[in-house]
């Protein structure tokens, strides 16, 4: 259940004026109950309860926009289409004077979501310990919860496992993982990368903060016959010790938090053996949008990924240059591939709604999850978001150059 919105008349009136003005200039059709249409034409946004819709936005901005969808106060036959229009115009939706006053009106991230070792465990558990069975309903058989890499578009459900293996192999190849490689994986997922690396002859240590993921990943590693080559530890990345020839981390930096980016990259630097390689897969956003929104509390923070923040490629360069000897030597973007991956997940989630219900998740949860998947897909379709595979190596010291 989504709580009823509470906002003063003044805030509701201001939100109504701003949102109406924004919608009027967008290539979509916002249809309000009663027959009024706003917009330049395009995908339909059906606002069934305008009073509640504007009141929610007045109360909590874009968080209210997502909550209004969860509550069924607005809907869209083509949800991704509507959200893509909004993502295309994200920088202009709020008038420039209000953008400059963002610190006065935007909700700020709660201190409880800070990614300290204790906070990280709670933040990760909020999402990844929901239910292994839930994730299995919409992911493919590899249980890979990150962007696949396809050979072409449009992608089909049957091609997703091969595309996920392609993604993993690109990362392992970039990191030089082979027979005898000492590999550290930061962020286990459900174990597919660890299995694939062990099949190459690598010795794998994989760390996660999700007890649910660890349990299933260990089972899958054992069933694949690689229990002697791959171990999964319930461990914060900051607590890892040892030396590794290769480090791979897939879409985990998004959960680190800006305050801890220097610690994260210093940890990679500390753990990497001389001549070693780091291969990361990271979701990124434009640097100007990162700077503008870095402290804002969003719908995604509240409902999906508490404590998360997407880096920009420029931010990664700044942090690694200032705090480590790691340098990015290769970067390849796959944003369109993530849009297709998310489409396939969303379609599968929708098709299996009855099974989601059977697991004990209600209709509001299903609308929340549908909005999350569509919202993410729209970010990549618009180009607002990208996903990149980065290869980092360590600059040699003067002594090593001699």
Image (tube, helix red, strand yellow):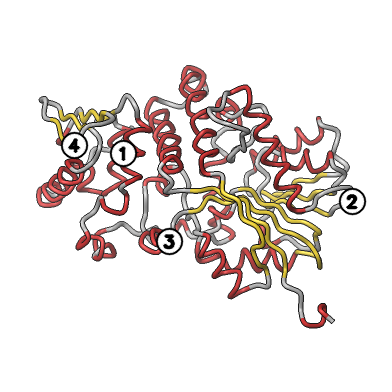
Q: Could you tell me which quadrant the N terminus lies in?
A: top left
Alpha-carbon span between mark 1 and mark 4: 22 Å
Relative image position of residue 68 (x, y in whole percent): 27, 36
Q: In the picture shown, does residue 22 fall above or below 40?
A: below
Q: Which of 113 and 73 is in front in this view?
A: 73
Residue at position x 68%, y 65% from top? 267
> Closer to the camera: disc 2 or disc 1?
2
The alpha-carbon separation of the residues under discs 2 and 1 comes to 50 Å
Q: Is mark 1 on a helix, strand or loop?
A: helix
Q: Nearer the viewer, mark 1 or mark 3?
A: 1
Checking the image for residue 49, the label placed there is: none
**Depicted 310 relative to depicted 273: above or below:** above
Residues at marks 4 and 2 touching, judged by CB atoms closer than 8 Å: no
Q: Tell which tag, 1 or 4, sits nearer the viewer.
A: 4
Q: Nearer the viewer, mark 4 or mark 3?
A: 4
Label drawn at residue 39: 4
């Amino acid at each position: 259940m989504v709580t009823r919105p509470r906002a003063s008349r003044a805030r509701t009136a201001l939100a109504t004026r701003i949102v109406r003005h924004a919608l009027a200039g967008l290539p979509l059709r916002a249809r309000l109950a009663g027959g009024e249409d706003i917009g330049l034409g395009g995908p339909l946004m059906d606002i069934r309860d305008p009073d509640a819709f504007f009141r929610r936005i007045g109360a909590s901005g874009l968080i209210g926009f997502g909550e209004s969808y969860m509550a069924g106060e607005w809907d869209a036959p083509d949800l991704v289409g509507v959200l893509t229009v909004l993502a295309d115009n994200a920088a202009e939706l709020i008038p420039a004077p209000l953008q400059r006053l963002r610190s006065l009106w935007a909700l700020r991230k709660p201190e409880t979501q800070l990614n300290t070792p204790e906070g990280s465990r709670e933040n990760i558990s909020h999402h990844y310990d929901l239910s292994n069975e839930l994730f299995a309903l919409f992911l493919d058989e590899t249980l890979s919860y990150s962007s696949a890499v396809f050979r072409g578009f449009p992608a089909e459900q049957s091609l997703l496992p091969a595309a996920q293996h392609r993604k993993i192999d690109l990362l392992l190849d970039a990191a030089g993982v082979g027979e005898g490689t000492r590999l550290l994986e930061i962020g286990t997922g459900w174990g597919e990368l660890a299995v694939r690396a062990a099949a190459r002859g690598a010795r794998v240590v994989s760390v996660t903060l999700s007890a649910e993921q660890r349990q299933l990943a260990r089972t899958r590693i054992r069933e694949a016959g690689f229990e002697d080559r791959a171990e999964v530890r319930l461990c914060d990345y900051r607590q890892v010790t040892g030396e590794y020839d290769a480090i791979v981390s897939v879409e985990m930096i998004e959960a680190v938090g800006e305050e801890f980016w220097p610690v994260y990259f210093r940890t990679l630097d500390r753990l990497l053996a001389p001549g070693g390689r780091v291969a990361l897969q990271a979701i990124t956003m434009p640097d100007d949008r990162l700077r503008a929104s870095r402290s804002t509390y969003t719908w995604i923070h509240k409902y999906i990924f508490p404590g998360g923040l997407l880096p920009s490629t420029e931010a990664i360069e700044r942090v690694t240059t200032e705090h480590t000897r790691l340098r990015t030597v290769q970067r390849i973007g796959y944003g369109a591939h993530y849009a297709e991956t998310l489409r396939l997940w969303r379609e599968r989630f929708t098709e299996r709604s009855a099974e989601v219900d059977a697991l004990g998740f209600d209709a509001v949860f299903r609308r929340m999850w549908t909005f999350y998947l569509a919202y993410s897909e729209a970010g990549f379709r618009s180009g607002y978001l990208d996903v990149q595979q980065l290869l980092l190596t360590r600059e040699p010291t003067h002594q090593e150059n001699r």
